[in-house]
Structures are given as C-alpha cells and as structure tokens.
Image (cartoon, helix red, strand yellow):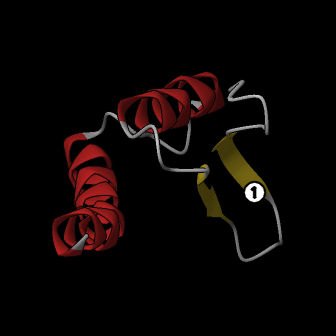
Amino acid sequence: MVDRLEVYLRVPLEVNELNKQALQSGILNFDQPQNWQRYFYGVIKTFPWLVYSFWGTPEGEFYGARRLPQNEL
C-alpha cells in the first residue's frame, strides 16, 4: 500500500518536471497550439492514473487533455 501511495504522489512531480523540460527544449511551444493537445494527450496516455494534464493562461484559457470516466482520452 505504501509503495502505491509513493508512486501516486510522485506522479505530479514527474509530470511537472516533464512539462518544464518540454518548455525549456521548445517541444511545448506556446506559439504552436497544434502541438499542445498532442503533448498533453501523450502525458495522459503515459500516466494511466492521471486524469488531467493542462496549463492555463493568465487570461483564463486552459489547454490540455483529460481522461473521461470510461478511460477515454
């Protein structure tokens, strides 16, 4: 049980690190919105227990992907 909890709690840190690296390397480029959905879809697909992966703008816009109740992405 503790092992599962540690994995579960580690996921947000790993996803944040991936997002940071994607931003720094230019993979996640805010000037190319067609790549955002593909990127966040890949994050959700990689972490099956993750429900949302997204980023928001100061203007209130959100871009990302989510997992629906039937495990659809």
- Depth check: 50 or 58 in front? 50
Q: Quadrant of the N terminus?
A: bottom left
Among the 4 quarters of the image, the one containing residue 47: top left
The amino acid pointed to by label 1 is Phe
Q: Which residue is mark 1?
A: 62
Q: Is residue 9 left or right of residue 29?
A: left
Q: Position of residue 22 (x, y in %)?
A: 28, 44
Residue 24 versus residue 15: which sits nearer the camera? 15
Q: Quadrant of residue 29?
A: top left
What residue do we see at 27% from left, 59% from top?
20
- For residue 2, above or below residue 70: below
Residue at x 47%, y 47% (from the top left corner): 49
Describe residue 31's horizontal placement relative to residue 23 as left or right: right
Q: What is the residue that sits farthest to the front in this orientation?
A: 1
Count of numbered circles on the image: 1
Residue drawn 56% across and 34% down? 36
Q: What percent of the width, then of the height, locates residue 69?
A: 79, 39
- Give the answer, above or below, for where 44 lies relative to 11: above
Which image quarter: residue 72?
A: top right
* Residue plotted at (25% across, 51% down): 18
Q: Residues within 10 Å of mark 1 (few under 14, many from 20)?
A: few
Query: In the rendering, at what x and y percent does residue 40 appear?
Result: 52, 37
Task: Report x, y in % for residue 65.
Answer: 66, 39
Left or right placement of residue 64 versus residue 69 in this view: left
Relative to 39, residue 26 above or below: below
Q: Looking at the picture, tell me which residue is in the foreground, 19 or 34.
A: 19
Q: Quadrant of the C terminus?
A: top right
Q: Secondary structure at mark 1?
A: strand
